[in-house]
Image: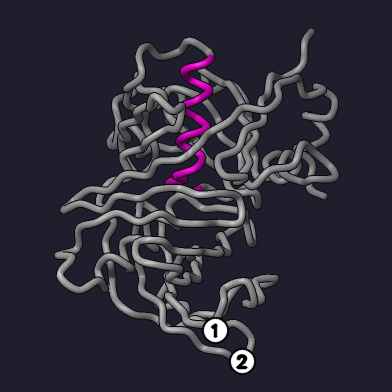
Amino acid sequence: MGGIEFLKGHGTQNDFVVLPDPEGKLELTEERVRALCDRRRGIGADGVLRVTRAGAMPTEAPDVESIVDRNMWFMDYRNADGSIAEMCGNGVRVYARYLREAGLVEGSEFVLGTRAGARGVVFNPDDTVTVDMGSPHRNGHAAVRVGETEYDAMSVNVGNQHAVSIVEQPVAGIDLSAEPAYEPEDFPDGANFEFVNVVSEDVLRMRVYERGVGETRSCGTGTVAAAKVYIARKENSNGVGTADVLVPGGRVSVRIMIGASTLTGPAELVARGELDESWWRSAAEPV
């Protein structure tokens, strides 16, 4: 009997294990996700993208069919610690790349499902991928702390929660080896923390500490949140505009509109193979 198919992909070096599972038959436990994402014990990744149909996940995600059509391809995204995440902008691009290369969708434009709702995807002539990221919402100010330094942050929801701090000091010097501190009432379910420099007009530099993962080379929803805050601060912008965001893993482009946003960037599949079934069984055991 063969092993369990997997692929490895990344979007601006935010990397993922892709698990094709159309019928939702894999028992994807927190322990298995952690093992898969472990860079020494498993394949190594910032998260796992399960490729399934929305209707194949009733027991694990009972609310999914109230968000998207049950026959829609659904991105079941898990953070590296095994926790469920609502949305992942880089992950959507990688997921879409897999759907297209596997022949599971037709054309250069299609819609897929996420826990944050349906998301439109467009493959561009230069092979970048543009994703409809929905309407990001600013929810007010919060304080976050790194060591002894307190930063003013703007709470932004992009289907998942973010705390964006636009700072003067170079973001390269901020210690993100541990999660920034925050008041639990500001982010009861946690957040991704973005620290942003304005490099020049409409060009940002960003580092991010992701909930359930740690610092990553990129965060797609984080770049949208950062652009949302930056554009809202611009004089005469009316909350509408574009920004290129530089992250350690590359560059993406964000467009903020009234009630909508898009994220454009690369997405690559770099490897495919099979997980050993005995390893898969053992990975279900707590370490």
Secondary structure at badge 1 equals: strand
Residue on which the image places disc 2 = 148
Relative image position of residue 35 (x, y in whole percent): 76, 42
Near-viewer residue (281 or 11): 11
Residue drawn at x 29%, y 50% is: 255
Number of marks in picture = 2
Q: Amino acid at mark 2?
A: Glu
Residue drawn at x 39%, y 63% is: 226
Relative image position of residue 33 (x, y in whole percent): 67, 41
Relative image position of residue 142 (x, y in whole percent): 39, 80
Residue 28 sits inside the magenta stretch: no
In this rendering, is residue 265 above or below 150?
Answer: above
Near-viewer residue (23 or 48): 48
Relative image position of residue 108 (x, y in whole percent): 36, 19
The reply to whether callout 1 and callout 2 are in contact (CB within 8 Å) is yes
Chain part drawn in magenta: 85-101
Circle 1 Cα neighbour tier, 10 Å, few/some/many (<14 / 14–19 / ≥20): some
| Residue 129 seen in this snapshot | yes
Q: Quadrant of residue 26?
A: top right
Residue on which the image places disc 1 = 145
Q: What main secondary structure does the magenta stretch of the protein show?
A: helix
In this rendering, is residue 185 above or below 9?
Answer: below
Residue drawn at x 26%, y 73% is: 233
Q: Residue furthest bottom?
A: 148
